[in-house]
Amino acid sequence: MKLLVTGGAGFIGSAVIRYLINETDVTVLNIDKLTYAGNLESLSTVKNNFRYHFAQVDICDAPALQQLFTQFKPDAIMHLAAESHVDRSIDGPAEFINTNIVGTYTLLEAVRHYWQSLDDVAKTRFRFHHVSTDEVYGTLGKEGLFTESTPYQPNSPYSASKAASDHLVRAWHHTFKLPIVTTNCSNNYGPYQFPEKLIPLIILNALEGKPLPVYGKGDNVRDWLYVDDHALALYLVLERGQVGATYNIGGHNEKTNLEVVQTLCTTLDELLPTSLHKPHSQLIHFVTDRPGHDLRYAIDASKIQKTLGWEPIETFDTGLRKTVEWYLKNSDWWQRVRDGSYRGERLGLIK
């Protein structure tokens, strides 16, 4: 298979590509604009593989996309390119509208014209896999789970832009018969994650003895999914998912934000017995909550488990330990990230 991956230099995209190159015979073309969160160093272990190719392209650039399709002739597309951080969408929604909505539309049109040029056999085999988020469903109360039939009710500029992209993909399938599959995932964590996200931010702040910011009372709940488990799920959906179907992917790991931070502190205390900042829990600092902060996300992943046989390998404890150990061993990677456009500052405060 020849697979074109958009956003392959990002956190989830790079995990997918590492899996594909290391565990399958898929040939990959990674296209990425290389914005602040795109980092080719996350692909250093596979960059010299003959099955891996890269092009720096913006998904809003229709002529460039058309040229790549003509040259590479993909059998499938996995669309991960997106602006993805809620706080940044509060600071500046425009980029989210442009990339997540206009970019997805531009990509869909380029894909549609390419797909229509294929012969009947290639058309039947072709897939467009759209990767989305559980945040499109809005917020849950203390009980219940998001299912594939949960109505959309996005509450942030980020989730609204992703919901719009989901609807565009569905419409291109319904109207133009483009063979699509869609996945909506819970919160990812693991190695190579950009440090504005909760888990790497807490790890790196703790290493430097900085305050560990917890929004509000820390009682917002998320379902945590180890990124390598997600990468395997995405490949299974691409290979075996039903055309037109949606699959929710979750880690079965509901934790409050405060529980996540406290577990990180305990893990760091154990792995860094000589740290001057022990106990790291003394660094926890409660800050003003995010505007419109959704209370709880939790995914029912029974459909993908029953139909495709997927379930997460990592528990929250094993995945979190692997994550902390990776950041402790790979300071060169995150130091170079922090020397760039993001230095740990608070984002998402309405001014």
Image: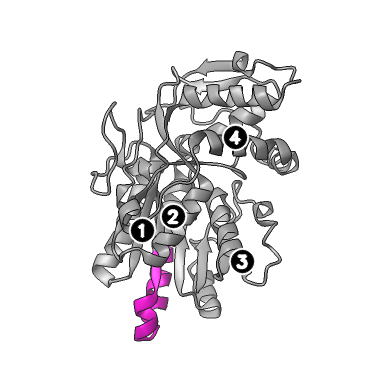
- Residue located beneath label 2 in the image: 233
Tag 2: amino acid: Ala
SS under mark 4: helix
Tell me: residue 173, above or below residue 147: below
Tell me: residue 230, above or below residue 225: below
- Residue located beneath label 1 in the image: 308
Marks 2 and 1, how far apart at CA? 9 Å
- Residue located beneath label 3 in the image: 55
Residue 274 or 42: which is nearer the viewer? 274
Of callouts 1 and 3, the N-terminal one: 3
| Residue drawn at (35%, 30%) of the image | 296
Q: Are the residues at dot 2 and dot 1 in contact (C-beta closer than 8 Å)?
A: yes
Residue 245 or 54: which is nearer the viewer? 245
SS under mark 1: helix
Tag 4: amino acid: Arg
Tag 3: amino acid: Ala
- Tell whether position 115 is magenta: yes
Tag 1: amino acid: Leu
- Residue located beneath label 4 in the image: 321
Marks 1 and 3, how far apart at CA? 32 Å
- Tell whether position 151 is magenta: no
Percent of width and height locating residue 255:
43, 29
Stretch of the chain drawn in magenta: 105-128
